Image: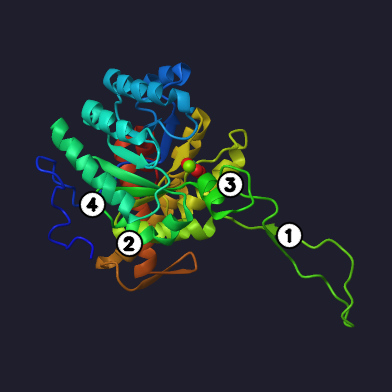
Amino acid sequence: MSRNAKDFFRPLALGAPEPLREIPARPSRAIHFFDPSNEKMAAKVPELAGTVDVLLGNLEDAVRSDRKEAARAGLVKIARDTDFKTSQLWTRVNALDSPWVLDDLTTLVTEIGDKLDVVMIPKVQGAEDIAYVDRLLAQLEARAGLTEPLLVHAILETARGVVDVEEICGASPRMQGLSLGPADLAADRRMKTTRVGGGHPGYVVRADARRTSDGVDVEGERATYQQDLWHYTIARMVDACAAHGIYPYYGPFGDIADVVACEDQFRNAYLLGCVGAWSLHPKQIEIAQRVFSPSVEDIAHARRVVAAMQHDGGDGTGAVMLDGKMEDDASLKQCLVLVELAEQLAERDPELKRLYDGIEA
Ligand code: GLV
Ligand code: MG
């Protein structure tokens, strides 16, 4: 049996802070990864603070094994020395079966736990991994005297993690969200791709051959349409997160030079319900923050629908015709998702506020 409803929000260690009842909707359109052991990247962090929603000190993959300790120590120093302004500070610790994770969690929570917002856990297999982290964080929070609970973000990058995605989302009140980890997931599932996210030109459907009335194939080009390798997983992740009141994210897009395909991948995730994506290079920050913010056109339309449904004392029920299209309670609700997101983002992003405020009624 999992924890009963009464116990679910009890701290898991004496002296640990109370878990949150609701996960705050803070902007996290771009989660910008940096390697704290890389001096060039570390030096950029103060400049990026305040310009990106989330700065994430990465300790896991992409950091060499002989740099793991330097990365951990580097993150402690950066967290202490930097004014993060409006940016949140997250970290990705090493995997739970690695030789580094225990020291990652112990050091980070006790030394800079008050600076960290979210701890990303890679290669999560099931709810038992979250339960382990949940208890350990509570013990460390108590030792550090923290007053705010740390939140946990799991990377969806194992086949078993996908199968158990709902249990993972509901395993702890600390669960803040999930990111798709397409590279590890592809390997774990034994997919035959070799990329870090994005599409593949071989994954297509092809139009039927044209045939004569006697059933003979007519030679000629047959159109092919590339399909999205990640649609199924992202859709499952979005449903699991929405059902548990937490947030889904697209993860990494490894082809840094292909900004067009990166934008497409991010936009597909946005349209399906994700709230953000990872940035592996400063040029992906702008893409993510733009794509995961509702467009001015969408907000203008959404506000028109809201106004039309409330016209003449309407309370948002019933139906109206707008530009030849039927709008009703359900399309109003979709519009409100966009309007509310725009309001949340505009509170933190003055440039967006100016854009949305400038929309003519
Ligand atoms: C991210 O960690 C991935 O494996 O894609
Ligand atoms: Mg990974």
- Whether residue 41 is situated above or below residue 284 in the rendered picture: above
Give the SS element for disc 2. helix
Q: Earlier in the sequence, mark 3 or mark 1?
A: 3
- Whether residue 149 is situated above or below residue 231 in the rendered picture: above
- What residue is rendered at 27% in x and 20% in y? 80
Q: Residues within 10 Å of mark 3 (few under 14, many from 20)?
A: some
Q: Residues within 10 Å of mark 1 (few under 14, many from 20)?
A: some
User: Can residue 48 be seen in the rendering of this structure?
Assistant: no
Out of 327 and 253, give the one closest to the viewer: 253
- What residue is rendered at 30% in x and 64% in y? 311
Q: Find the distance from the CA under tag 3 to the CA under tag 4.
A: 31 Å
Q: Find the distance from the CA under tag 3 to the CA under tag 1.
A: 18 Å
Q: Which residue is mark 1?
A: 224
Given the image, on which type of amino acid does mark 1 rest?
Thr
Give x and y (percent) for residue 96: 37, 42
Give the SS element for disc 1. strand
For this view, does 63 lie left or right of residue 142? right
Given the image, on which type of amino acid does mark 2 rest?
Ala
Q: Which residue is mark 3?
A: 198
Out of 190 and 332, give the one closest to the viewer: 190
